[in-house]
Amino acid sequence: MGRGRLPVVYAPDADERLSSWAARMAPFYAMTVSEFVAALGLQGQDVFDLEWRLSEGQGALIAARTGLSPEVVQAMTFRELGSAARMMIARKDRFLCPQCPDGLHRKSTALPWVFCCPVHGTDLQDAAGATLSDILGADRFAELETCAESGAAHLDSWARGARQGSLGAPEMLMVLTSRHRRASPPSVAEQPRMSLQTRRDYHEFLTTPILRQALTVVVPEYDQVAPVLAKPVRPGLHALAQGSLLQCFALTVGIGRIVEEPVARAIDVLLASDMDGQERVREALRSWPLALRRRISARFWRVERDEKACQTAEKAARQRQSHKYRLIQSQKYRYRIS
């Protein structure tokens, strides 16, 4: 190719990312993507680095070679996202839209909190072709959508570097991914129905300890449908960056629920935790604002006090009932021997 304007240039599709556009253009000129990028005047540059942060000069080079406006070129990059969100961007679509052409990758679908195609409005699918509605059931998915939208809005604001109030997405993810109980093998409820011989054959699976994380307390719907060995997620932001479709949706719902009721959700997790788990959850909560932690501590103390009072009352009632039963039995015995 010469140094002038390229004779044929594909127009970028709606919400298309720079790496996708370059990958569509390169075969037309019988080049690899790196060769095509070099032909645009950007030798030695990685297309994924370019679409993350494209300088004005680099954008002007691409515009001059293609005839696209600098604004259209910049629109194919992730310039609107803050540096902390870079780890969230997948190199290709995380989840698949059945109506999008093969090889076309959109900016929105590179983010783990987007579950609907921005162009076609269809639910995204995992690698097996299942949608969230298929995995969770249509009714349960519909019930969770509002919380998911709230969580996605919060994550989107965080990714763009906007102020989020007192509690940010990374702090909530640290709590959601904290281990609230010690690892334990699958419970009977978590195990599939199988014969005695099959249980013997899968003894190793049935006795494998599974990490128990706060996500299953905040989003019990996830605990009900997730495959037992796939329930654990990675810690913190890595949980979203490397999660499956179901895991990312559950984490997004969890963030939405914490945004609505941070104190109540923290209390739920602490009450469901064992002694070691409470320490780990409290450690994760240390990144939360002090005022919020004080409210959590005060309410948790009241809940524990009320729970102990209830247990004491129940114990006293059982003792009275036992005494009454022994008295009746004693009277019956005296009646028989008299």
Image (spheres, rainbow, N blue to C red):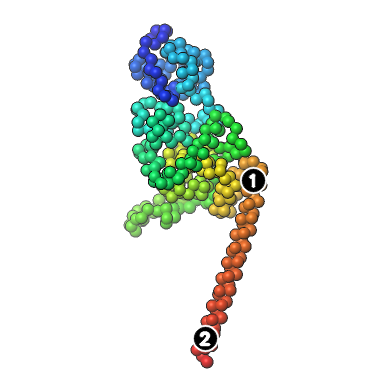
Instruction: Say if residue 28 shows up in the picture.
Output: yes
Q: Secondary structure at mark 2?
A: helix
Kindly identify the residue that appears in the image at 56 percent across and 43 percent down.
260
Q: Tell me residue 171's x, y (percent).
A: 58, 39
Quadrant location of the N terminus? top left
7 relative to 238 in the view: left or right: left
First in sequence: mark 1 vs mark 2? 1
Dot 1 corresponds to which residue? 293
The type of residue carrying mark 1 is: Arg
Residue 63, disc = none
22 left or right of 267 in image: left
- Quarter where residue 330 is shown: bottom right
**Crowding near pointer 2: few (<14 within 10 Å), some, many (20+)?**
few
The number of discs equals 2
Disc 1 vs disc 2: Cβ atoms closer than 8 Å? no
Give the CA separation, mark 1 to mark 2: 59 Å
Q: Secondary structure under badge 1?
A: helix
Decide if residue 116 is on the left or right side of residue 276: left
The kind of residue on which mark 2 rests is: Tyr
Q: Position of residue 123 (x, y in %)?
A: 39, 36
Q: Say which residue appears at 54% left-offset and 29% top-offset.
A: 160
Q: What residue occupies the far bottom of the structure in this picture?
A: 338
Image mark for residue 333: 2
Instruction: Examine the image and state in which quarter residue 175 appears.
Output: top right
Report the residue at 39% width, 11% height from top. 6
Which residue is found at the position 52% from the left and 88% from the top?
Answer: 335
Q: Residue 194 at x, y = what percent?
A: 34, 55
